Image: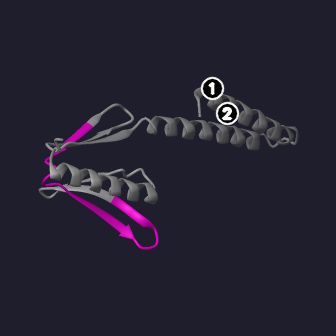
Amino acid sequence: MTPRAFYLFILAYCIAQGLFALPFLFMGAWPVAGFMGLDALALFIAFRLSFRDARAYETVDVTPVELVFAKVGAGGWRREWRFNPAWVRLEQKVHEEFGTQSVALVFRGETVEVGSFLGPDQKAELARDLTHALATAKRGPRFS
């Protein structure tokens, strides 16, 4: 949702809440109208937090020499892990009913979860792609 669409949505929601609050104001139940305003404020805050959290992302770069995994938070902080792809192991937890629950890189006893924000199908696809990338990196560079 674009920022303009977000503000139009909030404006339309506030107008609708105002229209629904008018009968309560006329009946003398003004606290109900106030709580309806709190609903609009809570929706605004929830959307703003969601937009802020959506700025977070993760990157995985796999080469024959190094695997670099970086998490970048919504606030701009960055945490980076570097692994030797020949020794890193991909670990995934799969629930028979709910699908892939987690995907992690394991290296020298250190476990780092990858794609924790993804759904089960996306985690399974990530695990498949990472497995392929690690196998390619372990084979080494291909010269033709």
Spot occupied by residue 84 in the image (x, y as percentages of width and height) = 13, 48
Q: Is residue 22 left or right of residue 135?
A: right
Spot occupied by residue 123 in the image (x, y as percentages of width and height) = 39, 56
Q: Is residue 100 magenta?
A: yes
Mark 2 vs mark 1, foreground winner is: 1
Amino acid type, callout 2: Ile
Locate the C terminus and report the quarter of the image it occupies. Answer: top left
- What residue did someone put label 2 on? 10
- What residue did someone put label 1 on? 4
Q: Are marks 2 and 1 in contact (CB under 8 Å)?
A: no
Distance from the alpha carbon under mark 2 to that under mark 1? 10 Å
Amino acid type, callout 1: Arg
Spot occupied by residue 68 in the image (x, y as percentages of width and height) = 22, 41
User: Of helix, strand and loop, which mostly describes the magenta segment?
Assistant: strand
Q: Secondary structure at mark 1?
A: helix
Locate the N terminus and report the quarter of the image it occupies. Answer: top right
Quadrant assignment, res 17: top right
Q: Secondary structure at mark 2?
A: helix
Q: Which residues are magenta?
A: 79-102
Residue sitting nearer the eye, 126 or 39: 126
10 Å crowding of disc 2: few (<14), some (14-19), many (20+): some
Q: Is residue 131 left or right of residue 109?
A: right
Extreme residue toward the top, this view: 4
